[in-house]
Amino acid sequence: MPIYEYRATRSTRACSHCRTAFETLQGIREEPLKACPKCGGPVKRIISRCRFAVVESSDRNRQVESKIRDYEASGMWSHAAELADKHSEKIKDKGLKTRALDNYKKAGYDVDTLLKHADAIND
């Protein structure tokens, strides 16, 4: 079901809910709302800015991600952490680096010590 945004047509007859945009789930075939569900004031559907990005991933990245998931599913946290850590350095992915740190922590490593060691190497 798509999410639609609405805003009051007249701010003088608007409550705090519809004075700024609010979102609602509606079926594609449903009629647009004509009134605010809180105050009953008139509203109009507005065009939302797009909030997604298409991220293309290489075959190698997909293979590594799959292997990391396999290690995590098997409880092999240190293997998952090491693979994620090395790959995050190659592709400069901060999200993957954070995932590696989480996996190191699950494996029982002291993450603060690892971060200090990494900082010392990078200096």
Image (cartoon, rainbow, N blue to C red):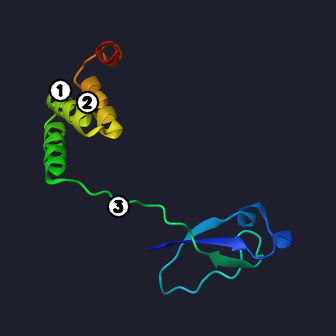
Q: Which mark is residue 54?
A: 3
User: In the depicted view, which residue is nearer to us: 46 or 38?
Assistant: 46
Mark 2 vs 1: CB contact within 8 A: yes
| Residue at 34% over, 39% down | 95
Q: Is residue 21 above or below residue 35?
A: above
**In terms of image quadrants, where is residue 72?**
top left
Tell me the CA gap for discs 2 and 1: 7 Å
Q: Which mark is residue 103?
A: 2
For marks 3 and 1, give the one nearer the viewer: 3
Image location (x, y in percent) of residue 65: 19, 45
Q: Earlier in the sequence, mark 2 or mark 1?
A: 1
Numbered disc 1: secondary structure? helix
Q: Which residue is mark 1?
A: 78
- What amino acid is found at the position of numbered circle 1 in the picture? Ser
- What amino acid is found at the position of numbered circle 2 in the picture? Asn
Q: Which mark is residue 35?
A: none
Tell me the CA gap for discs 3 and 1: 30 Å
Q: Is residue 12 above or below residue 108?
A: below
Q: Classify the position of the N terminus by image quarter.
A: bottom left
Q: Classify the position of the C terminus by image quarter.
A: top left
- What amino acid is found at the position of numbered circle 3 in the picture? Val
Numbered disc 3: secondary structure? loop
Image location (x, y in percent) of residue 69: 18, 43
**In terms of image quadrants, where is residue 116?**
top left
Mark 3 vs 1: CB contact within 8 A: no
| Residue at 72% over, 68% down | 38
Tell me the CA gap for discs 3 and 2: 27 Å
Q: Earlier in the sequence, mark 3 or mark 2?
A: 3
Numbered disc 2: secondary structure? helix
